[in-house]
Image (cartoon, rainbow, N blue to C red):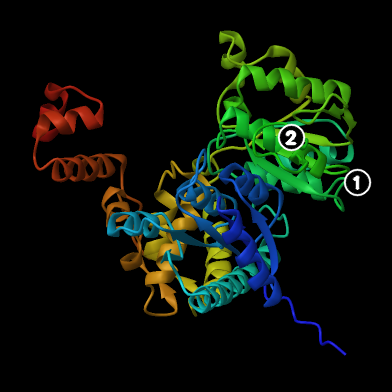
Amino acid sequence: MDVETPLQGKLLIIDDEVVAVENLTHAFTKAGYEVTARTTGPGGIDALMSGSFDVVLTDLRMERADGMDILRRAIELDPDIAVIMITGYATIESAIEATKAGAYQYIAKPFRLDDVRTIVANAMERVRLKRENRQLRNQVQEHAQESRIITQDAAMRRLLDTARQAALSDSNVFITGESGTGKELLARYIHDHSERGEAAFVAVNCGALQEDLLANELFGHEKGAYTGAVEAHAGLIEAAEGGTLFLDEIAEMSLAMQVKFLRVIQEREVQRIGSTKPISVDVRFIAATNRDLRNDVASGRFRQDLYYRLDVVALHLPPLAERRDDIPLLAYYFLKKIALRMGREVEEISSDAMDILCEHDYPGNIRELENLIERGVALADSPMLTVKQLPPILAERSVHVVRKRGENLPTLEQREREYIQWVLNYTGGNRSKAAEILGIDRVSLWRKLKK
């Protein structure tokens, strides 16, 4: 009785030499790999978009889409994937270019099949370890977040009350707020508190893809819809069936795409690229932007009818600088989550470090605070995150007057004097530049210095 060979991994082979593809497919299928083969570059890209793979074995020189195109698309779709280049035109320059772009290995023709087997096996093991580590980190992150929004700010609590009420309806929601304020997290919060919470939550960044790619991602395509579309592919709208589709950076969507997307909302149906048959969909839409879309509507950059379709329930996330009471709470939340993820025993934040964190303006909002805590945990040499682990520029910019126990609060005049001195030190004594930073003229600065 034959013993079934355990699955070694999913391998995609792309080469325009049919005989080479057939030989490699036979060898790796026999070795226990699940093999998908394509004989054109566009066919390989389409396979990447419609399936999942551990390792890609691709020829470098191909027409229409070469190995470098395959490499870039593969890493864009899956950062953990390993791409192995095969070429009969091996040069040091091409090897360096492929390695810099993220290729796992570079193999020159003619090659020994045993060598290729070894390289693929090693690549599979590396990908397996990377994915296991990523899965562990994601489990920690999911356990820590659970769509929770950490806040003790009164305005944020009122916002969450409104979000929970909105979740109970099936209305579209429009979220505004600066980058890094947590718009996707709020969208997940609404999804999880809705009747759709058990179904899929699908997110797409409208500003990260060109128009054609965004259309393909959202609407999908039929087999033969364009060169390389060798299989039908369902889009993200279909993937969100019964659940929620979150469209981040909706303001970046082109006017042509806006027209297509408006039809989806109005008709509750989607039409794949290359198809004439509409598919009914049951999806809730949540859109977000960091811009004032009313200005875009007024200037004609965004369709008014689409804006009103999306802006049924409007929620605005305030910047972190407007919810400073949340900074210590968020800082300790990130400290616990990141220390656990990194395996570091960092449990406290010094009072001086916390004062600096609380005084910072956070142009990058919550994402910036999380990055600062991650930096601190990575550099910490004790169980306490201190000022030493914060970026020096942060401490330098902080006009930091600490109220020590038993001392009176500094007067406004003392604050102003210290700030002016700090700005002068910052500009190296350049009074013209200091006056510009302070927002006053040189004469006013001279008077203050004389006083």
Quarter placement of the N terminus = bottom right
| Viewer-closest of 246 and 433 | 246
Location of residue 350 with respect to 88 vertically, above or below: below
Residue at image mark 2: 224
Residue 42: tell me if it is visible.
yes
Left or right, residue 293 beside residue 386: right
Q: Position of residue 133 (x, y in %)?
A: 59, 73
Name the disc covering residue 80, or none: none
Q: Amino acid at mark 2?
A: Gly
Q: Could you tell me which secondary element the residue under label 1 belongs to? A: loop
Q: Position of residue 347 (x, y in %)?
A: 51, 75
Q: Amino acid at mark 1?
A: Glu
Q: Position of residue 99 (x, y in %)?
A: 38, 60
Residue shown at 85%/36% (left/top)?
Answer: 283
Q: Which quadrant of the figure has residue 211?
A: top right
Left or right, residue 357 beside residue 297: left
First in sequence, mark 1 or 2: give its number.
Answer: 1
Dot 2, how many residues are within 10 Å of its Cα: few (below 14), some (14-19), or many (20+)? some
Name the disc covering residue 195, or none: 1
Left or right, residue 48 beside residue 441: right
Dot 1, how many residues are within 10 Å of its Cα: few (below 14), some (14-19), or many (20+)? some
